[in-house]
Amino acid sequence: MQRGIGILCLAALAFALWPSETASVVAQLTAERVVVVAAANNAESRGVAEAYCQFRQFPLDRIIEVEFPAGVTLSRAVWEDQTRVQVVAGVRSVDPEQKVTDVVLVYGTPLAVAAWEDDRELKDWESYYQKAMDDGVLRLNNALKVLGQLGGQEPAAVQLPINLADLRAVFQQQIELAQKAAAGKPKEEQATANAQLQSQVQAVAGLFPFMNSLQQQIQAGGDNLAAIQNQLQYLRGRSEVLTQTIQYLEKMPASYEREATMIALLEQGGGLLDVLTWLQRQMDLVQMNDSMASLDSEMALMFWGEYRRIGSVPNFLNPAFDGSPLRNAYRTLKVSRIDGATADVAKKLIERTREAESVTDFQGNAYLDLRGIQSGDPMLVQTENWLRAVGEQLKAVSGLKVEVEASAKLFQPGQCPDALIYLGWYSLGKYIDSCTFKPGAIAYHLVPGDALRLRDAEQQGWCRNLLEAGATRVVGSVGEAVPVLISIDPTAKQTPMAINIVTAELSDGMIIFAVP
């Protein structure tokens, strides 16, 4: 479920600074709501689990020990067929009333679940999309054939794979030929020809050509402007409803029923061109076998029924789903990880949390490390703009001193004292010890696969070193690094321990190293 669209993709996390005292945040978590997962036959893993339970004064029977295979990455087949079954049984044994809301993974447990090694899921989804694409191409060719007959120049049949840029050019040419041919017909035949033309244009491109045509007529002026404006307003409203419905569906877990509905809505709005564009993206996702995930994300979904492992899955714990019945329909667990290069580092994370929770007056700085990108790759520019906007938010409402490195340089060693928040990106495998962290500090450096190097002493990964350097909460990824979105409540207490870190999507490779 790792997103396979380049090194960076947008929208993985939401940081919300809630108006709550630190003590109340801690008090919300009770023993019956927590299960701690440790590696069986691993004394150090058990030791970290016990240290957490002692810290929170939870009974040790909240710990379940699971027989994980050795290594940081689990086989997908082993996880689905063996380990997941064991985990679910273990949780149910200590949670018969289904009160558990939080899972705590500790040192010694794997970090990731690999992509599918077999085609048990890939084959069915590839077949589904292929049949949908074949149907779309057949209907597209029928529409282009009619346009060609109207214009007197029938185009060559479209075949898969489709070059959508060339196809749009052919479509535009056929429209122009058909319009010219219709204008040359006797008046009594023009209405029929134009109706045929409009029907095929709508089938291929949906509502957009008509909206563009109406806008051009309004700009040109003339008669019946009021009627044209009303028609344009109607089409805009319909298009907006379709867009909002599609956006809502995109937040739903993938299913054959959801995909069929998506295809129908896309066809209404953007015609067969939009349908085939979307289907090609879905086919690419399947063919890339985009099914790697963090173990943490898989744990969050352990009580879901059937769901697709390919692609990403919405996190119904995210504030975007407040009040949504979907949250009740999909029992989703919040997962945190107490981990590090060694068991000792993991235990120190607990101690830093204890210290942070005793602080009543947080004083410190926020550091944002940008790249200085102003143009070029839209994804890189978008990430840079996001970080820049976060800096402005923090300056406006956090009460922290905010320092921004806006050039291509990195913050240098020792340059960031008293750090409570650190966000940066682009230094892959080249950690720089720039921050001196205060208890409660949050740190996230956006680089691909960094969390997988957590236990590799030869690597200068950011997750590993940020934890050792003293950050209290660290965000990382086992796959492609994913930029985050931050929203900050202006009325909130300026208390880093009250910041709630919740992913927007699950099965996307993200890990939150923190003590719940």
Image (cartoon, helix red, strand yellow):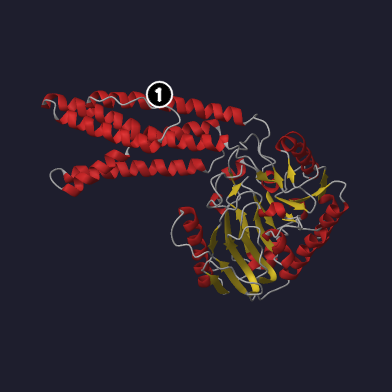
x, y percentage for residue 217?
Answer: 19, 44
Q: Is residue 68 left or right of residue 277?
A: right
Q: Is residue 378 left or right of residue 479?
A: left
x, y percentage for residue 97?
Answer: 75, 43
Specify the quadrant that holds the N terminus.
top right
Disc 1 target residue: 138
Specify the quadrant that holds the C terminus.
bottom right
Q: Residue at x 77, y 39 (%)?
A: 83
Q: How many marks on residues?
A: 1
x, y percentage for residue 245?
Answer: 44, 41
Q: Is residue 17 visible?
A: no
Above or below for 233 versus 129: below
Above or below for 464 versus 329: below
Q: Nearer the viewer, residue 45 or 318?
A: 45
Q: Nearer the viewer, residue 163 or 25?
A: 163
Q: Is residue 343 visible?
A: yes
Q: Residue at x 63, y 38 (%)?
A: 309
Q: Nearer the viewer, residue 266 or 122?
A: 122
Q: Residue at x 20, y 32 (%)?
A: 179
Classify mark 1: helix, strand or loop.
helix
x, y percentage for residue 166?
Answer: 36, 36
| Dot 1 alpha-carbon crowd within 10 angstroms: few under 14, some 14 to 19, many 20 or more | some
**Quadrant assignment, res 197:** top left
Above or below for 67 versus 177: below
Q: Amino acid at mark 1?
A: Leu
